[in-house]
Amino acid sequence: VKKVLLEQIKFGRNTKDTVRVVLYINSFDDYKVFKLKDPNRIVMDIEGSGKKAGGYYAGEKTTEPYEYKSGMPEDNVASLSEALGLKIKTVVIDAGHGGHDPGAIGPTGLKEKDVNLRIAKALKEKLDKDGKKFGITKVYLTRSTDKFIPLEERTAIAKKQGADLFISIHCNAARNKQAYGIETYILSLTNDKAALAVAARENASTSISRSEMNTVLKQYLLGAKIEESQRLASYVQSSVVSNVSSKYPPVRNKGVKKAPFIVLIGADIPSILVETSFITNPRDEKRLKSNDYINKIADGIFSGVQRFSGEMQTASVQ
């Protein structure tokens, strides 16, 4: 402490289950925060010049107990983006598969690539129409026609458009034709065989070799927005399940899961992949042909995005 970047550390318990740690930094250019195990720990890499920038550094050290006070509930500031009052303005929606890559195919020949595009377009239409009410002003599709886009290029499109959120739309598939349900994924390593099987199917068109995969993932996860992606995924998952089950029971809530999806690598923003239904299930395939069912799914994703974006819009300290 008191050498180069770090001037002071303060910490205190805010709530029964929350401890806040405050670092006073001379200068600040960039940061990464990530968790490691064995032993469990949080690592913060902070970059700066070491020179004080006028008006943005700590005063003399004080021995007074630290008490954080603000005009809003503590639980509402759940991330650095919220604490800084950063907004969600631009959303990129990715319709999975396309072109020569049909994705999964249903019992009567319905192609996943076509369903994904219908859902993506329906979601874009809803965000274009009502997104401005909660701060979203720009919405882009990675593809608007039946064309193939390499997995590695999809998040590159999100970066190019300056996206604040990335949502990849897919349909699930299984050898068991009776499998059904809805699940939402975030990018991470996992030992879950079922999740790995889903990722393997969705990653089938990648050019990244197996030997490169772990290195690429580990490097990316150091800077990934894991916490925010998890929260966005939970909101979208619960909203889609609630919305669809209101008219199309039964619906199985398969929850939020982690898996190494190539399509989520590269965009250092909250990113999720939604497996909307099992196209290999005859009942789900029939539903996926219906515009009403497509709209129910799109409405559910919209509601999840609205809740997440709304938190970001209102989380600035008053």
Image (tube, grey):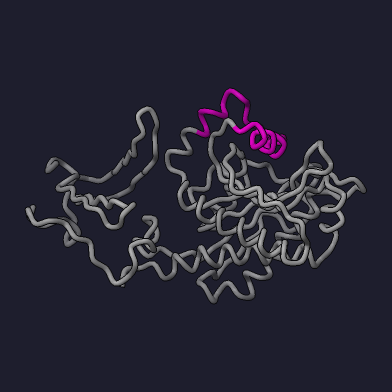
Figure check: 306 above or below 187: below
Q: Which residue is the extreme one toward the top?
A: 211
Task: Kindly indicate the quadrant of the structure image that contains residue 297.
Answer: bottom right
Q: Residue furthest right?
A: 108
Residue 286: % across, % down: 87, 56
Seen at 39% across and 57% down, the residue is 78
Of residue 55 and residue 6, the one placed in the foreground of this image is 6
Question: Within the magenta stretch, is there residue 42?
Answer: no
Whether residue 194 is in magenta: the answer is yes
- Residue 137: percent from left, percent from top: 55, 70
Q: Does the magenta stretch mainly form a helix, a strand or a loop?
A: helix
Give the residues drawn in magenta, as a range: 192-217
User: Can you give x and y, in whole percent of width and height, for residue 162 in the image?
Assistant: 51, 57
Q: Is residue 115 above or below residue 302?
A: above
Residue 64, position as x, y percentages in the image:
9, 57
Number of disc labels = 0
Q: Is residue 127 left or right of residue 29?
A: right
Q: Nearer the viewer, residue 215 or 147?
A: 215
Q: Is 161 positioned to the left or the right of 281 in the image? A: left
Which image quadrant is residue 123 in?
bottom right
Residue drawn 43% across and 38% down?
Answer: 222
Q: Quadrant of the C terminus?
A: bottom left
Residue 240 makes an appearance in the image:
yes
Report the residue at 34% width, 61% height from top. Answer: 83
Res. 26 in view: no
Q: Would residue 231 appear left or right of 192 to someone viewing this image?
A: left
Quarter of the figure that contains the N terminus: top left
Residue at image position (68%, 42%) is 150
Relative to 173, is 52 above or below? below
- Which residue is at the front of the view, 50 or 199? 199
